[in-house]
Image (cartoon, grey):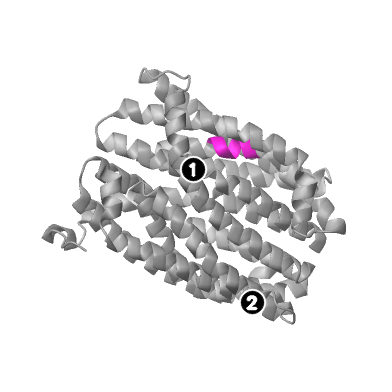
Amino acid sequence: MPRLPASTTAAPSRGQRREILRLAVPAFGALVAEPLFLLADSAIVGHLGVAQLAGVGLASAVLHTAVGLMVFLAYSTTPAVARAIGDGQPGKALAAGRDGVWLALLLGLVLAAAGFLAADPLVGLLGAEGEVRGFAVDYLRWSMPGLVAMLLIFAGTGLLRGLQDTRTPLVVATAGFGLNIVLNLWLVYGLGWSVTGSAVGTSVAQWAMAGVYLFIIRGNAVSSGIGLLPSWRGIRSMTRVGSWLMLRTLSLRIAILATVLVVTAQGAVNLAAHQLAMTIFSFLAFALDALAIAAQALIGRELGASNAAKARRLTRTMIRWGLGFGVVTGVLLALAAPWAGALFTSDPGVQSVLAIALWVLAAGQPIAGYVFVLDGVLIGAGDAKYLALAGVLNLAVYVPLLTAVALPGISGAAGLGWLWAAFALGYMAARALTLGLRARSDRWMVLGSG
């Protein structure tokens, strides 16, 4: 690797640390909105019964696959907007955000219609039967209207992050979370709608959030003289970049869905516990990803301004913070593991198995902190192709580990423990290696600045 200028090895200034925190702290609240939705849904639905909780777990896996594949709407918008801001072109930045919103609307309508019609066979592919399958189909179908809103939220949030504004998404997310809890309690228990009420309540809350973003984006576009109609050239450009990010996300979703397929064969108790563990993992992942969001916005801006030296300093600082934050969350999770299950279910079997999964998850938190920060750095630099190819390689490493867990005789608490060891330790370690090797080079900075 070429020798870096001496200034890149200097400790970050107080101003740089404040800059990171200014973006990362509000981003934390906004990022955990969706996991908080799921935590609330899991807590409310979990007390209805094991079958209901397992059904929501399966439906959530399918729903998150669709949503996860579309996360490029935020991840491609943020660095594009940030680089335009760094280059002194605010009009170009707003136009990129506008095009992202239109692309989100078009994709959301198509996916929601397909998901509603194909809900039953999609759930069936994961091996669900009987009551679990019925609850999963109900939850998935009535979550489809909210899917469109979620994609609009992705695009709107990506624009604001690129504009170096993470406080507005925090306010919107906080209000949406509160509305979601109120609606779900009323619909599930007040009206007796069961899992359908949970899905409907979440969809309504998501549309309320999307409406706020659309209002803000329209105001910014009009005040800046940017037209509201899309630029098809801009949409095509975003789609090209997004295709690599979609492949990267597809590899992640395949890993998660394959994990669900294995745990489904272990029985309803393990499946219900896995749903809770995965929801907690998502919550912690989004919390750690707050630094990644700061990385996307700041790295994109600095590379847009051709300031590779500052980009390198920011990267080193955020890596240290990511590792430290992973240690803290890991310790807290390990301490909470024996009692966490009681918050979500009254079933003692699920509570017992969940504690084992959470202890394994806690051990992998420092690795996760490292992974999510570097993911954000490379996304902010526009290094989408490498992320996609590395994702495929990481999946190839994970599949043999998952296959070993699926062998006959591995079941019960041990089965879920080994499953989470394969995911939280083995798979995440593979991601850490591929991302770390790339970050040590200068190639990603050349791509981002060019």
The question of residue 368 being in magenta is answered with no
The image shows residue 289 at horizontal and vertical percentages of 45, 55
The question of residue 148 being in magenta is answered with yes
Q: Which mark is residue 404?
A: 2
Is 438 or 68 nearer to us in this picture? 438
Question: Which region shows up in magenta?
Answer: 147-152
Query: With 336 as the anchor, is 446 left or right in this view?
Result: left
Query: With 91 as the anchor, is 34 left or right in this view?
Result: right
Marks 2 and 1 in Cβ contact (< 8 Å): no
Is 197 or 181 nearer to us in this picture? 197
Q: Is the magenta stretch mostly helix, strand or loop?
A: helix
- Identify which residue is drawn at 64% across, 39% down: 147
- Identify which residue is drawn at 75% across, 72% down: 266
Amino acid type at mark 1: Ser
Amino acid type at mark 2: Ala
The image shows residue 333 at horizontal and vertical percentages of 54, 71
Which element type, helix, strand or loop, lies under badge 2?
A: helix
- Residue extending furthest toward the right: 130
Circle 2 residues within 10 Å: few <14, some 14–19, many ≥20: few
Q: Total of numbered circles in the picture?
A: 2
- Identify which residue is drawn at 81% across, 49% down: 194
Circle 1 residues within 10 Å: few <14, some 14–19, many ≥20: some
Is 163 or 302 nearer to us in this picture? 302
Which element type, helix, strand or loop, lies under badge 1?
A: helix
The image shows residue 83 at horizontal and vertical percentages of 30, 39
Residue that label 1 marks: 243
